[in-house]
Amino acid sequence: MTFKTLDDISELNGKIALVRVDLNVPVKDGEVTDITRIERVAPTIQELSRKGAKVVLMAHFGRPKGEAVASMSLKPIAQSVEEVLDARIHFAEDCIGEAAKAAIGKLHNGDILLLENTRFHKGEEANDAEFAKDLAANGDLYINDAFSAAHRAHASTEGIAKLLPSYAGRTMQAELTALNSALGDPKHPVGAVVGGAKVSTKIDLLENLVTKIDVLIIGGGMANTFQGALGADMGDSLQEPDMYDKAHAIMNAAKENDCRIVLPADGKVSAEFKAGAAYEVVPMTPATIIPKGKESLDAGDATIANVIAEFEKLNTLIWNGPFGAFEIPPFDGATVAIAKAAAEMTEDGRLVSVAGGGDTVSALNLAGAADSFSYISTAGGAFLEWMEGKPLPGVLALES
Ligand code: ADP
Ligand code: MG
């Protein structure tokens, strides 16, 4: 995978740099509640501005379905960008045409302008060639810093890259480099922790991983389905009996590809799914019987010890999906314990650790482990599609 970065642009001074960023931030009552995505794109914007480019930001917000919807205007987000960057952010009422042209025409070198929501035009999600041309007409070169939008072939993520000299921004560069070190060209042995609620949402991911890694450590509700497929009676545990065949298929594919599968050795079984609920630790084997009315909500100490012993053998770890119902203590136990162990090994330089997924990121934050991981992807859907081995159109379009 090769792509150009900001280092490959010989002259930025006075150039109009069109930058695709992800400003699809959570908003409540008109206030941005999480500025992580803005912080992530700040380095690219600041570097371009410092180097004298006229920086023109393109982004989508919400799902306006091709029409101008006032509540999905990016204008209020421009204020948050101003605060994070501590710089004036100009705004254009449309991302193409006269409004965009006039606003861009007023920029001085180093100025920053945000264009209105690209999804106010139907051509954005349709990846319409004319619309991509209109976007490209705004500037001299294109920089994509929105990995999280790269799984969509839209005009501002894919179409435009074919029309202008194109580069990866710093955040895109960091994400691609981290992901490549985890799955593209990793240092073996490579292991993955895959947990979370359901097998059905992660079939493609599991099928891809077993062909590439050395050990697959399954936990969470997902592990219940595998235990059930192997013959255990999981009682009222979260599981998907209609996925038993899939679970067997994945175990067979793993065997064919020399990928070991590690399942939890024990479970925390409780009659109640609530904070502070009483539980008993039950060994997990194909002969296990969990009575009706009880469910396995987390893994126990034997599992934690096994997983940490597996981590010790690895050079690279990929993680998606919590190892139990981590939102409700004490069922956060296994997730927190193994997250801490991975964090410590990473700090010691013994492990490259890459994690992603909405609940996974929350769980690693809860464990105080996130800052120690080599890379945490906040990309959501794009991260999962990457783990599934799917080509990401926005990344492919940057390849040189
Ligand atoms: P991510 O968002 O990181 O991809 P998922 O959405 O697949 O992760 O799964 C996270 C959810 O799985 C959490 O809400 C967690 O409570 C739930 N979960 C994990 N293990 C269990 C379990 N044993 N029983 C019930 N829910 C579980
Ligand atoms: Mg989730």
Image (cartoon, rainbow, N blue to C red):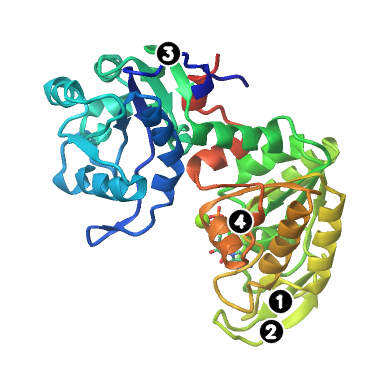
**Closer to us: mark 4 or mark 1?**
4
> On screen, 276 above or below 325?
below
Q: Which residue is mark 3?
A: 165
Report, in whole angstroms, how far the alpha carbon at label 4 lies from the one at label 2: 31 Å
Disc 2: CA contacts within 10 A as few (<14), some (14-19) or many (>=20):
some
**Residue 5 seen in this snapshot:** no
- Find out whether the residues at labels 1 and 3 contact each other: C-beta distance under 8 Å: no
Q: Earlier in the sequence, mark 4 or mark 2?
A: 2
- What amino acid is labelled 3 in the image? Pro
Report, in whole angstroms, how far the alpha carbon at label 3 lies from the one at label 4: 35 Å
Q: Tell me where residue 365 sits by quadrant.
A: bottom right
**Closer to us: mark 2 or mark 3?**
3
- Find out whether the residues at labels 3 and 4 contact each other: C-beta distance under 8 Å: no
- What amino acid is labelled 1 in the image? Lys
Q: Earlier in the sequence, mark 3 or mark 4?
A: 3
The one of 238 and 398 positioned closer to us in this rendering: 398
SS under mark 3: loop
- What amino acid is labelled 2 in the image? Tyr
Q: Which residue is mark 1?
A: 268
Residue drawn at x 36%, y 30% as measured from the top left: 49
- Find out whether the residues at labels 1 and 2 contact each other: C-beta distance under 8 Å: yes
Q: Tell me where residue 222 sits by quadrant.
A: bottom right
Q: Which residue is mark 2?
A: 279
Q: Which residue is mark 4?
A: 371
- Find out whether the residues at labels 2 and 3 contact each other: C-beta distance under 8 Å: no
